Image (spheres, rainbow, N blue to C red):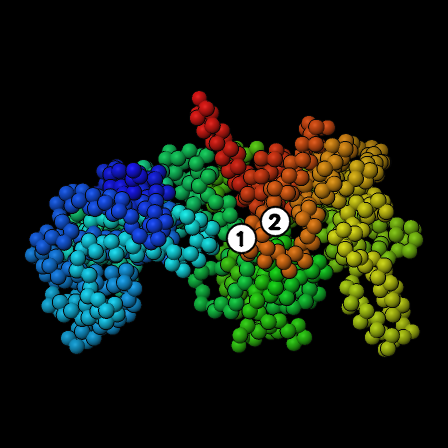
Amino acid sequence: MSKFVYLFNEGNSEMKELLGGKGANLAEMTNIGLPVPFGFTISTQACNDYYEAGKKISAVVEAQILAALQQLEENTGKKLGDTANPLLVSVRSGSVFSMPGMMDTVLNLGMNDEAVKGVADLTGNARFAYDSYRRFIQMFSNVVLGIDSFYFEQFLEEVREQKGYSADPEMTAEDWQEVIAGYKQIVKKHTKNDFPQEPKEQLFLAIDAVFDSWNNQRAIVYRRLNKIPDHLGTAVNIQSMVFGNMGDDSGTGVAFTRDPSTGENILYGEYLINAQGEDVVAGIRTPQPIHVLEKDMPVVYKQFTATCELLEKHYKDMMDIEFTVERGKLYMLQCRVGKRTAQAAIRIAVEMVNEEIIDRKTALLRVDPDQLNQLLHRRIDDNHNQTQIAKGLPASPGAATGFVVFDADEAEQLGNDGKKVILVRSETTPDDIHGIVAAQAVVTSRGGMTSHAAVVARGMGKACICGCESIKIDTNAKEFTVGDTVVKYGDVITIDGSTGQVFLGEIPMIDPELSDEFKQLLDWADEARFLGVRANADTPEDASKALEFGADGIGLCRTEHMFMDPKRLPIVQEMILAETDEQRQVALDKLLPMQQGDFEGIFEAMKGHPVNVRLLDPPMHEFLPDKEELLVEVTKLQITAPDSEELKEKEKLLKKVNQLAEMNPMLGYRGCRLGMLNPEIYEMQARAICNAAVVLTEKGIPVKPEIMIPLVGHVNELKRMRELVVETAEKVKEEAGIGFEYQVGTMIEIPRAALTADKIAEEADFFSFGTNDLTQTTFGYSRDDAEGKFLQTYIEEKVLPENPFAVLDRDGVGKLVETGVKLGRQVKPNLKTGICGEHGGEKSSIEFCYEAGLNYVSCSPYRVPLARLAAAQATIRHQLAEEKETVTSK
Ligand code: ADP
Ligand code: MG
Ligand code: MG
């Protein structure tokens, strides 16, 4: 016969699934000899059994409950419903994951008209007894019978007023008796029944209520939001009562064994003298900081600190503890691993290693990589009194203050004048890049976490809020409104990209803190990990940042961002618009020294670490003005200045824009296709990279350039582009009379490339999986369109488990990556492989990369610490799993 009910001395902390977190830890504390009021736990299995039986406690479960109750009575020497020495219990819910929405705890169950007299006689404290009874009626009626607390509070208020009291302590035993009589009438009125006097009936009603609460609306919604499975069920804990409200030698409190916000190794918590558990939560009286207990009750305090230390050593973690003191005697009522901020998580993990409580591997697994984001960006100082005006999606962390602008050009102008601006747009497109570069932060009213603005801002480490739908932008009036608030061009706002909040006015900021403990933990991560971590960086500043955050190199340097520079864009356009080869060469000759300068800066910043440079990738039209806008200008000029040079120029431009317009730019004339048809562009870029390598080599600074050809689908593309690069490089070496090492490789971002990776590997020194494009081309989704239109619905309706642009799709895209690695290494066993793209900074994708045997991941500089930790965790988790396997197979 299944066991459904466990006395506290029959369980342990490993049994969370069966006993719930609360029950398992009460059992554990009981077994290590801590003073826990005795009791028993009705298992989650009994809850499932209850639902299977059509919301009925089966005879088997009922019998086991009654047997456990009898044990509890023997253990305590008290009896439920006894008139002389009544047992009072609490009924507490508790599932595997702590869950708001579940039934609240009922205290003092077992009280009735007779038991209350027994308690009064036994304690010699009638006031206490009747107060406890009326609390029980109120709690039970609210939690189990579903009567709103308001009726009880209102009645109590009336009694107090009528007696002329200002607070509860003035109430006498007789006053409470009067309240109890009134409470009973309230119950009668609402339920048409008398308040249940029979303690066993009270008990089973309360147990039913806990089980029922597993499926109340709040709990269901919470489970859905937090992806907690419905079938887990909740356990019920029945525990004998202890009383913190028996006088000034009693009290109740909560404590963390370390400071949960800073991680400092000090006892942190608060308590109330002469109070029961719910008083602390209710906030009627202000609790005392825990260290005051040392003066109030020195003996108890000593015992409590010793218990906290013991619990920490036992669980090897920072604990969150609930306790009660009854007449100078300490009781432990709950313990669990405490929640903490990122800062505290790091400090606690590192200090516990130093204190020899845990080892380094455990410490590394204790910190959630996602939490680190909080620490790597400037954030708002919480002490401010500005009002939040809107809230959107926290798309890219960090905080910023600036003047509101609505247009990328304006952002750029003001930005170049040294003004701090925040670009507010309905959404952004590649045409807005220069504005995003110049702005402190970006806010969009449309779009999701992976919209253009979000991706670009994260890449640049800039704060960004997306999908801030309450903001209505009027670009013509140059203002936006949120409700009644109007924010005009040039007004100052502050935003926090970590929370998605938008505020009016300026708010002071706190700089990111890379604490010593943080650095220590990351050093340990580097020792533990095999997977390399590189950064995506396009400028010397980003490159330095990447190194500072511990990157092993640059995994993707995008040359087009260098082309977007406003000083260069006209020359880039000149190159695109050239009608003859000579004209084009003139423009390229102007670009060459600029690009060379860029690479010199980046190579120098990277101090000999490898730098992967991708040759030009985006479609040409991204460097030209918007077609629609141009058309408007031309039409205007045709009327106002029909014979002007300007009109001729613009018409020429429009013609070119029309020529370059594509039905599907994503699948169009871009990537290596540019180099195939206009080899002089790639030649110029290759030359700039090699010239830079020469300059640095001459200066005695080591360089490791990796030249990467994008969007290869057929080996012949790579073959030809490789020849071009090698030819150029050899020419440069010969001219300079200086040698340097370089590699030529390709991005794998088209399924065909992954599927023919063996052929492609013959021409490649390395593969870099461009998982952004590879996801687009594998799913056949255009990312910008997908996110604006159907992707959200797909995710909500669970057609897709996650957004594949955020979390790498292992089944599809992942299979292509694995295939690419396998085929490539058949030809070149030491082929270097990595990924670049958003996934390189996401923890589960990083774990996949480790499993697929990649050499490195590459992500934005700001995510490098996260990736270092995630890479270490992937390694450690697999090591631990292997150790376990060898143990079990022995
Ligand atoms: P929650 O899950 O909301 O923390 P608990 O079941 O821990 O709810 O109960 C809340 C509080 O009720 C506890 O912190 C404790 O102060 C009090 N409490 C619960 N059981 C008992 C008991 N047996 N004796 C005294 N107080 C209790
Ligand atoms: Mg609790
Ligand atoms: Mg690409």
Left or right: residue 600 compared with residue 470 = right
Residue found at x 92% / y 51%? 582
Please say whether residue 403 is visible from this viewpoint.
yes
Task: In this rendered view, identify the residue nearer to me: 501 or 40.
Answer: 40
Task: In this rendered view, identify the residue nearer to me: 50 or 515.
Answer: 50
Left or right: residue 692 compared with residue 606 = right
Does ligand 3 reach within 8 Å of label 1's beta carbon? no
| 399 over 25 or under it: above or below | below
Left or right: residue 813 compared with residue 632 = left
* Amino acid marked by disc 1: His
Q: Secondary structure at mark 2?
A: loop
Residue found at x 79% / y 52%? 668
Q: Quadrant of residue 10?
A: top left
* Amino acid marked by disc 2: Pro
Foreground disc of the pair 1, 2: 2
| 182 over 245 or under it: above or below | below
Residue annotated with mark 1: 377
Residue found at x 72% / y 60%? 431
Label 1 vs label 2: CA separation?
26 Å
Task: In this rendered view, identify the residue nearer to me: 106 or 229.
Answer: 229
Q: Are marks 1 and 2 in contact (CB under 8 Å)?
A: no
Residue 427: percent from the left, percent from the top?
65, 63
Q: Quadrant of the N terminus?
A: top left
Task: In this rendered view, identify the residue nearer to me: 569 or 54.
Answer: 54
Residue 812: percent from the left, percent from the top?
64, 43
Q: Secondary structure at mark 1?
A: loop
Residue 465: percent from the left, percent from the top?
57, 60
Residue annotated with mark 2: 804
Residue found at x 43% / y 36%? 362
Q: Residues within 10 Å of mark 2 (few under 14, many from 20)?
A: many
